[in-house]
Amino acid sequence: MDIIFRIDPISHRLQGKVKVPGDKSIAHRAAIFASLAQGRSIITNAAPGGDFESTLRCLAAMGTRIERKGDTVSLEGCGLAEPQDVLDAGNSGTTARLLCGALAGAGVYAVITGDSSLRRRPMSRVINPLREMGANITGRCQGRFAPVTICPAHLRGVEHVLPVASAQVKSSLLLAGLMADGATTVIEPWKSRDHTERLLPAFGAHIEVNGTSVQIHPGILHPADIDVPGDFSSAAFFIAAACTIPGSELMVEGVGLNPTRTGLLEVLRRMGAEVEVKSRGGVEPAGECWVRNPGVHGTDIMPDEIPSVLDEIPVLSCVAAVAEGTTRILGASELRVKETDRLEAIRVNLSTLGARVEVEGDSLIITGVGQLKGGRVRSFGDHRIAMAMAVAALNARAPVEIDDVSCIDISYPGFFQDLASLVGVST
Ligand code: S3P
């Protein structure tokens, strides 16, 4: 059922502390690596949303014994056994693409599908390089889309030069490399999020990182316990909102501060926001983040910066829509192949709310209008578009209705409750 959420124009400054749920990129990886290992791994502060559930469901279907108590998940790994039925990755591109790599050399027959959004997203970006390694893998429309079929094959290590920076593709190929003969190398044009490179060694993998090049050697994994930091991409909605609303003072606790994910902080600083972080370091650095709003102005986000702000562009666009001057987000073509075409979704929604937004090729040009007007916007079934629109709504002078917010449960089931407690209203 479509759930419409309405936000009224009251004083919406954000005040206080928030702790967001565990990072879903890290949780997916920890669970997949744990399933490949022999023995018990424990993941604490696991992601609560539907995407991580999809990963657990697929892994359970391949023989991993999984027990979940709240946000602690125990996985008894034993490698990936042939599933009895089609694997359903739901809305999760990370689940589908990483499993393609993990299954390519696993010696089993498997089919991976997903919901209507996932079945429209490009799978050739993993299928083609996996075939170069010898994988017997194909998909609908000559290997372009899911459902994807994988048959047993013998893999060999290959050097892959990726045309776009993609953590899902990189991770898929590295997982295949674990089961290949010889070393596998992945070279990206720019560095995408590096959770796979950071976490796999904790499970015993042999990985070398050199700039944007990552090399993996074949080997077996052993179990590991992983404590997942808060998801920076979830915290981003509150951080961005606090930057746009005068009088806000926000602290985010226990949030992931991996530099390949936190490009938003640098962009917000350039826009004039006061942002401070204190990181405790670790395999996956985490810590606290404080934000205050002294008024924001436009900036340019260049193509090499896109990977570090990739999932934050919808909410960054909402900041740009109320900032002084023009913000140009250049070379953001990857947004067209996310859960929806995010460039188009941003253009349609922010235009409805009175912002000046143009899409020029793969770039977004947004001229801020100070305050937005009210209206009805759409989530397009995309969790990050829905949450970004809530941030836009906080900056509107009339009520904003967001159509179909149920998709938020994919990554952040308690989003509206946490937002309400920061702005001091009850949901
Ligand atoms: C993810 C990688 C990113 C990101 C997605 C999660 C991951 O996609 O957009 O939400 O967990 O590896 P890319 O594969 O385009 O980097």
Image (spheres, grey):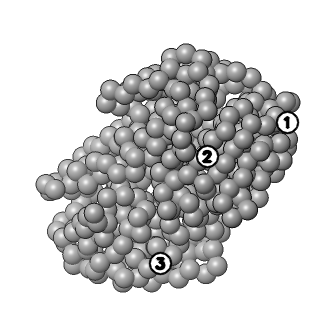
Residue 285: x and y, percent? 52, 34
Residue type marked 3: Arg
Q: Total number of numbered labels?
A: 3
Going by the numbered disc 1, the residue's amino acid type is Arg
Label 2 secondary element: strand
According to the picture, the residue beneath numbered tag 3 turns out to be 347
Left or right placement of residue 380 versus residue 344 in this view:
left
- For badge 2, the amino acid type reads Val
Are circles 3 and 2 on residues that touch, CB within 8 Å? no
| Real-space CA distance between mark 3 and mark 2, rounded to the nearest whole angstrom | 36 Å
Task: Tell me which residue sits at (83%, 42%) in the image.
Answer: 134
For disc 3, the neighbor class at 10 Å (few under 14, some 14 to 19, many from 20) is: many
Q: Quadrant of the C terminus?
A: bottom left
Image-based side of 201 in relation to 26, left or right:
right
Residue 290 numbered tag:
none
Q: Earlier in the sequence, mark 3 or mark 2?
A: 2
Circle number at residue 111: 2
Percent coordinates x, y for residue 103 in the rendering: 67, 37
Q: Nearer the viewer, mark 3 or mark 2?
A: 2
Whether disc 3's CB lies below 8 Å from ligand 1 is answered no
Nearer the observer: mark 1 or 2; the answer is: 2
- Ligand 1 within 8 Å of disc 1? The answer is no
Residue 45 location (% of width, % of height): 39, 31
Q: Looking at the image, can residue 405 be seen?
A: yes
Dot 1 corresponds to which residue?
156
Q: Quadrant of residue 203?
A: top right
Measure how far apart labels 1 and 3 are at the Cα level.
Answer: 44 Å
Circle nearer the N terminus (1, 2) = 2
Q: Viewer-proximal residue, 103 or 249?
A: 103
Q: Is residue 313 above or below residue 114?
A: below
In the rendered structure, which disc, 1 or 3, sits on the residue that comes first in sequence?
1
